[in-house]
Image (tube, coloured by chain):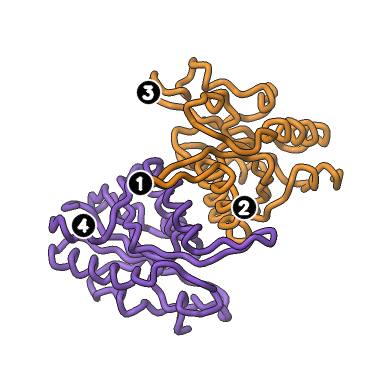
Chain colours: A purple, B orange
Amino acid sequence: MQDAALLVIDVQKAFDDPAWGQRNNLNAEANIADLLAFWRAKQRAVIHVHHSAEVATSRFYPGNVGHEAKDEGRPLPDEPIFKKLVNSAFIGTELEQYLHTHKIEKLVVVGLTTDHCVSTSVRMAANLGFEVTLVSDATATFERKLDGIHYTAEQIQAVHLASLNDEFCQLTTCSAILGAGS
Amino acid sequence: MQDAALLVIDVQKAFDDPAWGQRNNLNAEANIADLLAFWRAKQRAVIHVHHSAEVATSRFYPGNVGHEAKDEGRPLPDEPIFKKLVNSAFIGTELEQYLHTHKIEKLVVVGLTTDHCVSTSVRMAANLGFEVTLVSDATATFERKLDGIHYTAEQIQAVHLASLNDEFCQLTTCSAILGAGS
């Protein structure tokens, strides 16, 4: 982990809106805060990705409260923030070039939501050649429905982790990282 | 659908290997064959993406039987084939440029596997600005395990379709396309 950057995806107040429905892992933000403190204490690279929107009615429109970082994921002034308009942190941003410029080859990914922006960014990071670790208890998602069938947030999280594991990333937990202390 | 290209992903014999485990939707290939016949009869664009590998022991290594297209997805001589080394059809290939050159803005996606290469390619296509329709019964995947928990191929397919729907693509079925006849 020593040379891995912590990539913090969409830890923004927009996801506090109850309209998203039932969420899993309400500890995600606390775990992200712990990982941020750990990365900063070790003086390792921290990179933020924030979702933005071009439509003023969007929760993610700059200036709307939803666009703000949650307290647990608030960037420090010297930490880069990449603004994206789509799910992937690598499309329409300079993130890939930034990582190459800073010789960062390993990413530890946390954030929201597991099956949308986190999964898409993990997949692209891996396919672009980065070595990706996903912290399973520092991500979360929401319930979804399709064809009248309801899927709990826990079901969605579990299945997406199973699909990502080994193919795009290695999975770990917050406590495994903090417990190892390195 | 009139101006949409049919994007056929990884319909290759490698996936016949029983080592992948239990699969859902054994009709996927027959549905893909029907859609290919329909697209060709209408003289619409058909684009193939084939997985390749640089390691000779891989099922997908060129020359190994697994690298060959399945009969139901076999390209015609005038249909382009994009070879990829990773999950995304857009990384390390000229597919995006090809679509722009041919003014193709809409993709109807079919192929294998739902949660790996199909999902990754659908996500990137959408994030790159293409309008994506995914034919849910012309895709399939395999069972997976994580942390001792077994997920059936049907479970994985259903959850991934629920996550992709509306966020990255619209879902349809083979019969809905063929039944509409246009």
Query: In the figure, is residue B91 to the left or right of B34?
Result: left
Residue named by callout 1: A169
Is residue B13 something one can see in this rendering? yes
Q: CA distance from mark 1 to mark 4?
A: 15 Å
User: Do the residues at pointers 1 and 2 share their chain?
Assistant: no
1 vs 2, front mark: 1
As helix, strand or loop, the secondary structure at mark 1 comes to loop
Write down the chain letter for disc 3. Answer: B
Q: Quadrant of residue B86?
A: top left
* Residue behind mark 3: B55
| Residue on which the image places disc 4 | A177
Which one is nearer the viewer's eye here, B66 or B77?
B66
Residue type beneath disc 3: Val
What amino acid is found at the position of numbered circle 4 in the picture?
A: Ile
Q: Residue B133: image x %, image y %?
A: 67, 50
Does dot 3 land on a helix, a strand or a loop?
loop
- Dot 4: element: helix
The image quadrant of residue A48 is bottom left
x%, y% of residue B179? 85, 44
Within 10 Å of disc 2 (Cα), the crowding (few <14, some 14-19, many 20+) is many
